[in-house]
Image (cartoon, helix red, strand yellow):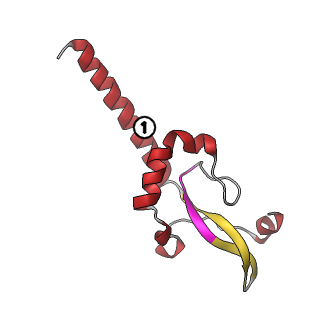
Amino acid sequence: MKKKTKNAVLVSTTVAALYFASYLTLSLNGLYEPADLGLGEQGLGVKSYRWSPYGFGAPVGRVRSACLFPYYPLYFLDLRFWHTHCKTVPQGYPERVLSREELERL
């Protein structure tokens, strides 16, 4: 292989590894954010949760698009295979609990 080709392969591999490693770091530090609010037996409360890697969370039911856009392929795979909907709160993953004041502001 030519030297330019080897350098291009090395740079491409390094960039791809950093991309995956950065998302993995964000995902490992993420938590389940409230996705839907509704009325229940105890009044207004959280109905469902959605996985949110660190920094992706926004007010209830939203995700920061600027964070999501570059990582969307990995975020999609993460939700599909690792942090699936059936693994929400009862599995012991970290979750963000809304206080009564936060619920009332929404």
Q: Is residue 33 magenta?
A: no
Which residue in the protein does label 1 denote? 19
2 w.r.t. 72: above or below: above
- Position of the N terminus, as image quadrant, is top left
Left or right: residue 52 compared with residue 15? right
Residue at 44% x, 55% y is 78
Left or right: residue 9 compared with residue 44? left
What x and y, as percent, mark residue 90? 51, 76
Question: Quadrant of residue 97 in the image?
Answer: bottom right
Residue at 40% x, 42% y is 21
What element does badge 1 sit on? helix
Residue 55 or residue 76, whichever sits in front: 76
Q: Residue furthest top?
A: 3
104 w.r.t. 77: above or below: below
Left or right: residue 11 compared with residue 62? left
What x and y, as percent, mark residue 56? 59, 49
What's the magenta region? 48-54
Q: Amino acid at mark 1?
A: Tyr
- Position of the C terminus, as image quadrant, is bottom right
Give the class, few, some or many, for how many residues have Cα within 10 Å of label 1's Cα (few <14, many ≥20).
Answer: some
What x and y, as percent, mark residue 36? 67, 67
Secondary structure mainly formed by the magenta segment: strand
What x and y, as percent, mark residue 58? 67, 52
Residue at 53% x, 55% y is 30
Residue at 47% x, 73% y is 91
68 w.r.t. 11: above or below: below
Q: How many marks?
A: 1
